[in-house]
Structure formats: C-alpha cells, structure tokens
Image (cartoon, rainbow, N blue to C red):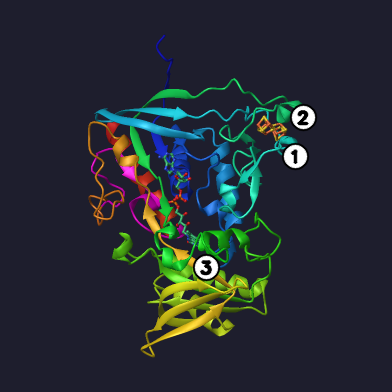
Amino acid sequence: MPESIKTLEYDVLVIGGGIAGGESALNLADIGYKVLLVERDLTIGGKMILLSKVFPTLDCAACITTPKVSEIARHPNITIFTGAETEKVTKLGEHRFEAVIRQKPRYVNVSDCTGCQLCEEACPVSVSDQYQYGMVGRKAVYIPFSIASPRAAAIDIENCTLCGACERVCPTQCIDFTQTEERFLVKVKSVVVATGFELFDPLKIPRYGFGQYKNVITSMQMERQLAPTRPYNTILRPGDGKMPDNIAYVLCTGSRDKTVGNPICSQVCCMYSIKQAQLLMGALPMADITIYYLHIRAFGKGFNEFYAQAQDMGVEFVKGKVGKITEKENGNLILRYEDIEAGQVKEAEHDMVVLSVGVLPNRGISETFENQKLELDPFNFINQTDILASPAKTSIEGVFVAGTASGPMDIPDSILSGGAASAETTSYLRRAVS
Ligand SMILES: Cc1cc2nc3c(=O)[nH]c(=O)nc-3n(C[C@H](O)[C@H](O)[C@H](O)COP(=O)(O)OP(=O)(O)OC[C@H]3O[C@@H](n4cnc5c(N)ncnc54)[C@H](O)[C@@H]3O)c2cc1C
Ligand code: SF4
Ligand code: SF4
C-alpha cells in the first residue's frame, strides 16, 4: 500500500526555529501571511534559548527568548512542526514551491501533556543529556528543559526499553507508542532558510585533550553551567566536582585555523568568552580567569567597553597561542603556549580549561533543494548572492536566508537578518499579487 502523505498549504515555509527563523516567522505572520515553521529539534529557540546572559549588556538570554518563543508558539498565523525536517524542496514556478516534510514520532501527544514530569521520575533509563552537552544525564522519556517550547515530554525510542513505567504513571494518558513517522507535502509561495550553525567539535584538535581530560570543557558547556536552566547549582569542574578557582579560556578553538578546515573568524567567541569571564567573576569571586587570545575582535557597539570592563574586573588577557594541554594527577591542566608579546614558550597551570569553540556551517540543507541549486559560499554557508543590496537573497528566487545559516553572527545581527529575510520575502510575495 503506498504511504499516505497529507497535503498542506501555507504562504511561507521557514526552515529552522532559532532566533533568526523565529523573527522571520513572526514578522511574516504579523503581516498576515500563513507560516509553517519547521524545527528539527524538540523545541524552538535554537542555541539562544540555552544561553546564560548576552554580551555586551549581560541581559538574561532566557528573559529575551522566552517571551519571543511564546509569541511565536501562540501566533494564529504560525504552525510549528518540531522534531521535523525538510526532505526535499522543489521550485515548480514563480511563487510555487513544494516541500516534503518528515516529522518523527514523539510518542507523546503534546496537547495533552501537562509537563508534570511524573514519567521522568518513573523511567529507569538514564542517558547523557544533549541539552546539557553531556554534563549530566536525562531519562529516556524527558522534557528537554524547563523553558522548552513546547514544554512537553518526548520519548527517546533508541534508549527506551518499552518497560511501560511512564505510561502507567502518566495522569493524562498522553503517552502513545503507536505514533509513527508522518510525511507532509507542503505547498508554499516562498521559503526562508534559517538553519543556523554547528559548533566546532574539539575532538578534532586532540592536543587540547577534550574528551580525554574531564576538566577541559567547551564554551557551550560553560554557557550551560552559567544558565538558569543549568545542570548544577553552581560552577563545577566535571572531573571531581570541585569548584574551580583558576580557569583558562582558549580562544579561536577551531576558528581562523586552516589546519582544521575553518579559516574564518567565528565573530562571537571573543565576546562570549569575555562575557563568561565576567559572569564567572560574579559566581566565583575568588577565581582567577585567564583568556589566551590571538586578537580580540571587539568590533560591535559597546564591545570594546565590555572588553575594558573585563580587564578592569581583573580578567587576565594573554596574547598567546596554546600549543598543547596536558593533565596533572590532581586533574589540573598544564597549558604550553607561545607568549607572543614576550616571544617565549611558557607553561601555566589552571584547574579548568574552557575551549572557545567556533561557528561552523550547518551542512545538508542545500542538498534538499531539488531542481535548482541553493548555492553555498566558499566556507559552506548559504551564499548571499547580492550581499550588499539584498542580503537575504539566495541563488534561488523566492528562497531567502536568515541568521547564521549565511555565516557567523551574534544575536542582534541574527534578529536583523531574520527581519531582512521577512522584508524581502514580503516584497517577493507582493509581486505575486500585483
Ligand atoms: C557558547 C556561545 C555563546 C554565545 N553567546 C552569545 C551572546 O552572549 N550574545 C550574542 O549576541 N550571541 C551569542 N552567541 C551566538 C548566538 O548563539 C547566535 O547568534 C544565534 O544563536 C544564531 O541564531 P540562529 O537562529 O541563526 O541559529 P541557531 O541558534 O543555530 O538556530 C537554528 C535552528 O535551526 C534548526 N535547524 C537546523 N537544521 C535544520 C533543518 N534541516 N530543519 C529544521 N530545523 C533545522 C536548529 O535545530 C536550530 O533550532 C553565542 C554562541 C555560542 C556558541
Ligand atoms: S517505556 Fe521507555 S521511556 Fe517509558 S519508562 Fe520505560 S524506558 Fe522509560
Ligand atoms: S507525558 Fe504524562 S507524565 Fe510525562 S510530563 Fe506529560 S503528562 Fe506528565
């Protein structure tokens, strides 16, 4: 029997529900267009919903993201598919696109789930929590985190033993193991690609010891430790649960480095590291923080002042290239580095090291475009074919790009880019009726 596929119609398909895609969807929906927002993850909000505070204002990231996310979720003109991906997009003609969307089963009826977490308590299976970047565990049935949208449970079927404990305790009987993957044929007039970025994998630089030395962590792991939805109630080094008092940051881990295939600057690592250093000084007032850098890129409004503020607070900045990290018996780490200003190779001991990992392209989305090529730039981000006059324009007329899908940028620029994509989409859609 052929697989059944539901046909749906919207004005715009937005692929990716981070801050950039969310902004585009919201603007288009406010104008009156019907938007389908397709998000691969179990929650919308992208990386921003996982952050602690934001540079250079130190505003709470969740306090900015949560109202926006709930506005998107409640908007009558926006339909959201989470746990869903675009299988293919075909341009049939001007203002005529068809997309095939695949939505994975969640095994929980979202509308009936109250988020009570009784299922989580009952589930006997613990696995690594991807939203805490592996620092703690989660259950096989889980709510991603407390401010997730939708705030509903999902079952990780790969790790589930089908013991039925969650089903037995669920007060609303919303767990449903009969759910299967669904496919939709979606007809739209325009597409916004807002698939964001990937983080550099520090395992690709073995001399830094990530994955081998427990007290070498990534900046995203530190971001989670500093966030309101954090894994522990304080800052801990994973090796022994001790509070660190001498933390080092290694900037440009996986950025501006041809040897790992990423020659470009990630634009946000200097500033988020300076932000984290300031937050750590608040959380651990006795701690020493040292930032090893090649150049500090403090190019935005208020960024240089933010950098100076960190220096005034006592954060130490060392212009140095870290060559190798080794571990002592007590879990402390020895950084061997070239002190660029002194012209010497030196060593320094720290009890925790944070690798400021770079921003990489999120590959794969261009291949889903079937009969016309969604071009990439030399660094594999989506090519902005008219970057100066029409920055959201791509190689396919009617397909626009928003946020870090086109290259590294911070949150304000991602929101601006989401706004530009919605404005250019609107003008394209208006050409359809005139
Ligand atoms: C450690 C760290 C700290 C940071 N701190 C700050 C800060 O303090 N201030 C600041 O301004 N910026 C900061 N940033 C940068 C900030 O995270 C980005 O600017 C912002 O998240 C970009 O938003 P986006 O929507 O473009 O991408 P993302 O946040 O990556 O969102 C993309 C979304 O698309 C989804 N997606 C991907 N592929 C598909 C697909 N094929 N189909 C459907 N959905 C898909 C993803 O699941 C994700 O939800 C920080 C970054 C890092 C790594
Ligand atoms: S059925 Fe699966 S998800 Fe539910 S409690 Fe058992 S192991 Fe956990
Ligand atoms: S699935 Fe059931 S038990 Fe689990 S959070 Fe939702 S309502 Fe509660």
- Residue stretch rendered in magenta on the structure: 390-412
Which mark is first along the chain, 1 or 3? 1
Give the residue type that dot 1 points to: Glu
Give the crowd class for mark 3: few <14, some 14-19, many >=20 residues within 10 Å. many
Label number found at residue 195: none
Task: Kindly tell me whether mark 2's CB lies below 8 Å from ligand 3.
Answer: yes
**Residue picked out by circle 2:** 169
Left or right, 317 with respect to 381, comes to: right
Label number found at residue 121: 1
Q: Is residue 26 visible?
A: yes
The verdict on residue 264 being magenta is no
| Residue at 71% across, 36% down | 123
Front in this rendered view, residue 128 or 328: 328
Front in this rendered view, residue 242 or 419: 242
Which mark is first along the chain, 2 or 3? 2
Left or right, 240 with respect to 194, comes to: right
Front in this rendered view, residue 402 or 316: 316
* Element under disc 2: helix
**Residue picked out by circle 3:** 354
Give the residue type that dot 3 points to: Val
